[in-house]
C-alpha cells in the first residue's frame, strides 16, 4: 500500500502502545471509527516500519490522520518512537495489566480453536515470533514442559522490558486495565473527543483452559508500575 502525505503532519494523534491483550480493542471501540482505529493497515505497518521506521512513521501518521490509535504492535517500537523527530513529542497511553493475567490471556487467546484455523496470523508471525521470540502455537495447554516455561519466561521478559522502556517517552499516561472504563474522560481530554461507549466491545475469552499465576512477578510489576505512575501522576500511584 502506497501512502500519500497530507500537507501537514497530524501531531494530535494519541497512541495507545501497550501490547496485545491489554484492552486496546475496547479502548479504540469507545470512539468513532472516523477518529480512532485498532491495528490499522496492520501487515503493511510491520513490513514498512522494519524497513524504514523514520520515513514510514511520518507517512503513516499523515495518511491515517487519527485522533487515537490503539495498536499492540507499537510495544515493540518504543525506542524508535523515543528517537523519532515527530513521534517523541506525541502523547501516549499505556494500559497496565498484571503479568499473570496478561500471560494467561495471551496464551489462551492465541490457542483458541478459531485462532488456530488461521493459515497466516499477522501478529503471530510479525509480533510474537519476530519481536517477542515466541511461537504461541507451540504452547501445549495442560502439560508442564520446558518449552512451555521458556515461552512464559520470554513473555514475561518482554512485558517488563516494554513497561520499563515506556519511561523514556516524554508524554505518557498510565491507566490500569481495571480502571479503563472509568478513565475514559482522561482519554477524551487527550484527544479532545467524546467517547461513544454504546458501540464499544472487547475480545473476551471466558473459557480459559490455561491459568498462569506468579505472585512474585506480579508484585515486582506492581512496584515497577507504581514508580512509573508516581513519576507522572502521584495521585494515581496509591
Image (spheres, rainbow, N blue to C red):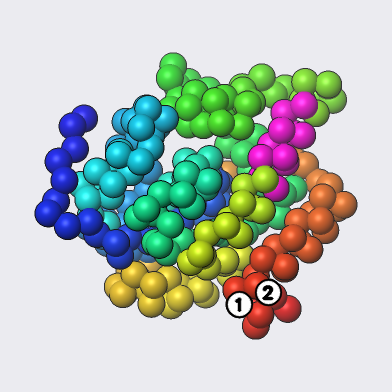
Q: Bin the neighbour count of mark 1 within 10 Å (Cα to Cα): few under 14, some 14-19, many 20 and up.
A: few
Q: Quadrant of the N terminus?
A: top left
Looking at the picture, tell me which residue is in the foreground, 58 or 42: 58
Residue 57 appears anywhere in the view: yes
234 is higher (above) or lower (below) than 225: below
Q: Quadrant of the C terminus?
A: bottom right
Residue at mark 1: 233
Residue that lies at the very extreme toward the right in this rendered image: 216
At a point 41% along the width and 49% down the height, the residue shown is 84
Image x and y of residue 52, in percent: 36, 32
At a point 52% along the width and 54% down the height, the residue shown is 23
Residue that lies at the very extreme toward the top in this rendered image: 119
Q: Does residue 219 appear left or right of residue 25 in this picture?
A: right
Residue at mark 2: 230
Secondary structure state at the residue bearing disc 1: loop
Secondary structure state at the residue bearing disc 2: helix
- What span is colored magenta in the figure? 150-160
Q: Does residue 97 appear left or right of residue 34 in this picture?
A: right
Amino acid at each position: 500500500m502506497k501512502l500519500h502525505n497530507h500537507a501537514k503532519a497530524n501531531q494530535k494523534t494519541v497512541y495507545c502502545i501497550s501490547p496485545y491483550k491489554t484492552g486496546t480493542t475496547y479502548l479504540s471501540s469507545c470512539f468513532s471509527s472516523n477518529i480512532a482505529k485498532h491495528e490499522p493497515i496492520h501487515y503493511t505497518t510491520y513490513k514498512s516500519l522494519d524497513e524504514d521506521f523514520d520515513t514510514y512513521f511520518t507517512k503513516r501518521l499523515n495518511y491515517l490522520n487519527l485522533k487515537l490509535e490503539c495498536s499492540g504492535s507499537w510495544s515493540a517500537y518504543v525506542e524508535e518512537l523515543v528517537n523519532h523527530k515527530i513521534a517523541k513529542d506525541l502523547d501516549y497511553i499505556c494500559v497496565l495489566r498484571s503479568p499473570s493475567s496478561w500471560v494467561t490471556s495471551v496464551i489462551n487467546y492465541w490457542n483458541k480453536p478459531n485462532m488456530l484455523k488461521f493459515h497466516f496470523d499477522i501478529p503471530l508471525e510479525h509480533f510474537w515470533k519476530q519481536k517477542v521470540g515466541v511461537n504461541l502455537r507451540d504452547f501445549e495447554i495442560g502439560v508442564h514442559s520446558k518449552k512451555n516455561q521458556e515461552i512464559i519466561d520470554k513473555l514475561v521478559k518482554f512485558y517488563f522490558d516494554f513497561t520499563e522502556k515506556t519511561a523514556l517517552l516524554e508524554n505518557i499516561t498510565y491507566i490500569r486495565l481495571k480502571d479503563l472504563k472509568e478513565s475514559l474522560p482522561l482519554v477524551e481530554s487527550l484527544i479532545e473527543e467524546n467517547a461513544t461507549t454504546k458501540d464499544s466491545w472487547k475480545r473476551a475469552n471466558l473459557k480459559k483452559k490455561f491459568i498462569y499465576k506468579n505472585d512474585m512477578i506480579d508484585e515486582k510489576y506492581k512496584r515497577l508500575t507504581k514508580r512509573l505512575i508516581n513519576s507522572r501522576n502521584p495521585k494515581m500511584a496509591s
